[in-house]
Image: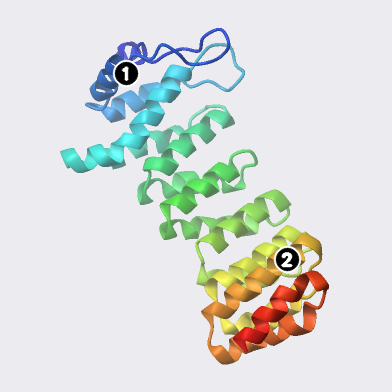
Amino acid sequence: MDIQPYLDPFPLPAKRGILSDINKEKTEKAVQEAMKDPEAVASLLVKRLLDPGAEGNDIQARHLLHTMAVRIPNYDRKVNGNKRVKFSLVLAKSLSGNYPDRVKAFVIRQLQICGGEEVVPAIGAFLIVEGIADDAAQALIAIGKVSVEQFRKALPEVKNNSILYRNVLHGLAELADDSSKESFLEALVNEDDECRLLGLWGLTQIGDSSTLESFLKADQKEKGFSRIKAASYCLKFAEKIQKKDAAKIYRHLQKTRTLPEEKYLQQIAVSAL
């Protein structure tokens, strides 16, 4: 298959790097033609992608691939041919190929738009790869709860890398993973303040009263911005649990938030009690 006719209608940057002279009619026609065989086109488009800064130009290929990723879910519903899954699997398969990391990151961002459960394992493999892990986490979070096992699996492998560890904790917290309670508790004693905050947030997300003592103990150790953020988690936690347990949080805020600029927290606590 020659995909160049699908690419030609897409504009190239002018001298100042600005896209111009877009022929919408021709571009739309090219997209419609490409969507007739999305898997084959996707496979060839990935081969056209270049590492940013490399010699050559892949702007047209990137634009077409992104357009297809955006449209394939709706297109799939119209033709009822499981096209989205097949298209997504083609992209997921390319992640195991010999492509530059930044090309793989771009492909993962397209899977964030169109991918589902079928591509979760392929994306999850990159949670332990610096430079791609953030894109992988965002894609998995967008796909949803079916991705949580990938974060659990990656956690033991990234504990010695603070950047990757924070990224995985963020995913587990965002997905409110009840099974990660112990991991959130462990994060509360981490030397990194962001990890501790992610531990507090994770416990807030799952709203388990049995963790309240550890949560409040960790909260009172935070300073600066972390102290402000931790207070907001306290309030959110209180909204998720029974009144008798929530009262412990409000009394804790009364006791620990005594600075003039924290007067609003005192007011909230008094009102709640």
Report the label total: 2
What amino acid type should be assigned to the residue bearing mark 1?
Lys
Q: Is residue 78 left or right of residue 109?
A: left
Residue 211, percent across and down?
63, 81
Looking at the image, is 76 positioned above or below residue 66? Answer: below
Neighbourhood count class around disc 1 (C-alpha, 10 Å): few under 14, some 14–19, many 20 upward: few
Question: CB atoms at circles 1 and 2 under 8 Å apart?
Answer: no
Looking at the image, is 68 positioned above or below residue 7? Answer: below
Give the image quarter of residue 6: top left
Give the image quarter of residue 245: bottom right
Residue at position x 52%, y 78% in the image: 240
Q: Any mark on residue 228, and which?
A: 2
What amino acid type should be assigned to the residue bearing mark 2?
Ile
Neighbourhood count class around disc 2 (C-alpha, 10 Å): few under 14, some 14–19, many 20 upward: some
Q: Is residue 95 visible?
A: no
Q: Any mark on residue 24, and which?
A: 1
Q: Secondary structure at mark 1?
A: helix
Quarter containing the C terminus: bottom right
Residue 156, percent across and down?
63, 59
